[in-house]
Image (cartoon, grey):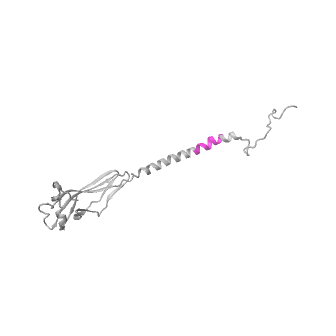
Amino acid sequence: MGRSREYLGERLVDSYDGGRGGEDCCEMMKGFCWNILPGILGALTALVLMSALLYYPYKWSFDDGKSPEFSVAVVGVSRLDPDRDLGRPTLDPTFDLTVRIKEPRRYSVACVERGTTAAVSYRGVQLASGPAPELCGRNENTTEARSVMAWGHAKAVPDFARSASPRSSAAGTRRWT
């Protein structure tokens, strides 16, 4: 009769299991680690990967303030001979131009719209104009249109522009813009 209750296999202290039918704390942790924790870690991993997949294309679409460069170069000039034509009060020059678009951005397009006019002037005096072609530069590329014509008809050139003509510039170089 001197035996204790513990010796007979009975528990001396009853544990409260929260109504889980005898499942103890270790069993709950095991269930959490094997069932719930992988789902949470998988969702966090997916969130990190999706953030990277969405962020970098967005970041790469901006090219650090780069903007397209539009330029027009005079390739040829006719009916504007300094010795013969600059003495007349009016001029009828014709310019052969090259229109160029340099697009430095990766995911962008820059265009010269239909109806744009290219004008040639010298010292603030417009000498000729003509329609520029519809032209687009795309994705880090340079696009150009050659043989764009600009012409002037009976353009009056003031004396200050005529006296500072290319004929009087140093080394005989012609600089019409």
Q: Position of residue 151 (x, y in %)?
A: 20, 63
**Residue at the (30%, 52%) spot, across then down:** 142
From what the image shows, is residue 79 above or below residue 31? below
- Asked if residue 176 is positioned above or below residue 1 in the image, the reply reads below
Q: Is residue 33 magenta?
A: yes
Q: Quick check: 105 left or right of 36?
A: left
Residue 8: image x %, image y %? 82, 33
Front position in the image: 50 or 90: 90
User: Which residues are drawn in magenta?
Assistant: 30-40
Q: Position of residue 4 (x, y in %)?
A: 84, 33
The image shows residue 60, relative to residue 88, as above or below, that is above
Q: Residue at x 32, y 51 (%)?
A: 141
Q: Where, quadrant-wise, is the N terminus in this rendering?
A: top right
**Looking at the image, which residue is at 20% across and 60% down?**
95
Residue 78 covered by magenta stretch: no
Quadrant placement of the C terminus? bottom left
